[in-house]
Amino acid sequence: MRQALADAGIESAEREARWLVEAGTGRAWTDLIAGSGGIEVAQEQRTLDLTHRRALGEPLQYLTGVAGFRHLDVAVGPGVFIPRPETEQVVDRALARLPRGGIAVDIGTGSGAIALAISQERPDADVWATEISLEASSWAKKNVSALNSAVHLVSGDIFEGLPSSLRRRFDLVVSNPPYIQSAEAERLPDVVKDHEPGIALFTGGDGLGVVRRIASEARDWLREGGWLVLEIGATQGDQAVALVEGFGYAEVSVEKDLAGRERIVEVRR
Ligand SMILES: C[S@@+](CC[C@H](N)C(=O)[O-])C[C@H]1O[C@@H](n2cnc3c(N)ncnc32)[C@H](O)[C@@H]1O
């Protein structure tokens, strides 16, 4: 198995092989190594099938059905974006801006990762999440239920679907929106462009179409002094700053990731 994955060019073949064995057998690696109980034929067949699919390029997390995000295991599969480690930093910034007992909304929640993490780490907050894709929404719903979370999910475009009674009441709007130009699709790794939903990745034009709409509409949903925290692409810092300044936001700052790339824009209404 490890060799099949390594031959397919997968760098961390050893680790992935273990995870796929655990997913295929439903048993912990340590139990299997300890030799407690044998492996049934069906479990072995399932493990081989998962390994084969991984070697053919399917994302590991779609095969194991789970992605780690901060303190959570989030269920994922075809139809939903796989939460990325860099977005954990977006949650750090969101938590720093969210007052005690505050109201927050995660726009384009996908699996629910950002909203679920905020709600888990700040149970005092009232957390909402919106999503336009019905497939992604069904994953978010599943996660909210499995994690027994208090996040309120709504379906719709950007802020559509939120109760109008929440207008001008949010302390925080946070989002990891699609921000890759459609023209850039060919540069993405196959494991991303062939499997993850296009609506989660791409927008037309300059790649800031959804960012622009969120920044524009958030002015109607944030209270005075509330914060907008947005993940952006590594080369979009200057454009994103100009964009939010154009909408009249104050206290504009850009957060860098560990590699020194500008990845988060924070602004105050
Ligand atoms: C990059 S993914 C991020 C998902 C999740 N927030 C995360 O960080 O793992 C962007 C998400 O925004 C959703 N989306 C795209 N356009 C949207 C729109 N106009 N309104 C609401 N959600 C949208 C996509 O379906 C996708 O789930």
Image (spheres, rainbow, N blue to C red):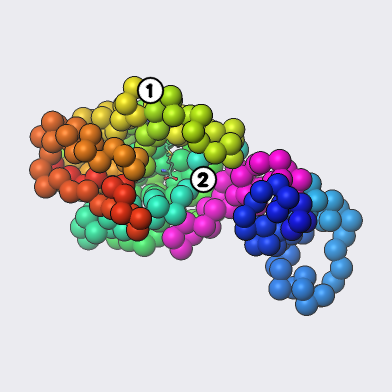
Q: Residue at x 13, y 31 (%)?
A: 246
In the picture, the quarter occupied by the C terminus is top left
Amino acid type, callout 1: Gly
Mark 2 closeness class: few <14, some 14–19, many ≥20 residues within 10 Å? many
Residue type at mark 2 is Ile
Q: Label 1: how many residues lie within 10 Å, few (<14), some (14-19) or many (20+)?
A: some
Q: Nearer the viewer, mark 1 or mark 2?
A: 1
Residue marked by disc 2: 82
Q: Which mark is residue 204?
A: 1
* Image position, residue 167 (x, y; %): 21, 36
Stretch of the chain drawn in magenta: 51-77
| 165 left or right of 201 in image | left
Disc 1 and disc 2 in contact, CB within 8 angstroms: no
Q: Residue at x 36, y 62 (%)?
A: 121
Residue 145's disc number = none
Image position of 196 with respect to 124: above or below: above
Residue at 85 percent across and 63 percent down: it is: 39
Give the secondary structure at mark 2. loop
Q: Is residue 226 above or below residue 182?
A: below
Q: Per the image, is 52 magenta?
A: yes
Give the Cα distance between marks 1 and 2. Answer: 21 Å
For the residue pair 8 and 180, the one nearer the viewer reads as 8
- Sequence-first disc among 1 and 2: 2
Residue 246 vs residue 128, the one in the foreground: 246
- Count of numbered circles on the image: 2
Q: Residue at x 78, y 77 (%)?
A: 34
What is the x, y in percent for residue 68? Answer: 52, 57
Give the residue furthest to the right.
Answer: 41
Q: Furthest residue to the top?
A: 205
Q: Nearer the viewer, residue 99 or 96?
A: 96
Q: Position of residue 261 (x, y in %)?
A: 31, 49
